[in-house]
Image (tube, helix red, strand yellow):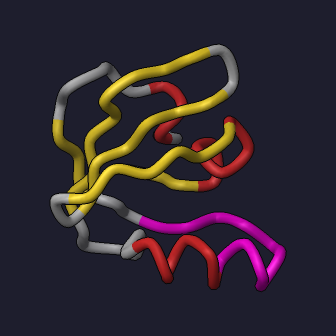
Amino acid sequence: MPLSEVKLNQTYTVDKIDIERDDMKKFLFSLGVYPGERITIISKLSSNYIINIKDARYSIDKDLAKAIHV
């Protein structure tokens, strides 16, 4: 299921990254978002998502959240 559809403050394991653009995939990898990593959505604000991964918080947009499958 896409990260955009999960519940807040629950930890999930990234299953796959489903995105065609290599630059966006590299961006997610630079944040530490890759299969096997644990990820939590801290909050949803309009079309922005605050995620927690590897003890760091990042903001991603809805398109990136849809590309991350857990």
Report the residue at 41% width, 69% height from top: 33
Q: Is residue 40 above or below residue 38?
A: above
User: Closest to the observer: 25 or 36?
Assistant: 25
Report the residue at 65% width, 77% height from top: 25
Q: Is residue 27 above or below residue 39?
A: below
Q: Is residue 28 above or below residue 44?
A: below
**Quarter-wise, where is residue 37 in the image?**
bottom left
Q: Is residue 6 above or below residue 57?
A: above
Instruction: Please give the range of residues in magenta.
Output: 16-25
- What x and y, as percent, mark residue 20? 81, 73
Report the residue at 26% width, 41% height from top: 40
Q: Is residue 39 left or right of residue 11?
A: right
**Quarter-wise, where is residue 35 in the image?**
bottom left
Magenta stretch containing residue 37, yes or no? no
Q: Is residue 58 left or right of residue 42?
A: right
- What x and y, as percent, mark residue 42? 31, 29
Q: Is residue 8 left or right of residue 20?
A: left
Report the residue at 17% width, 41% height from top: 11
- What x and y, as percent, mark residue 41? 34, 34
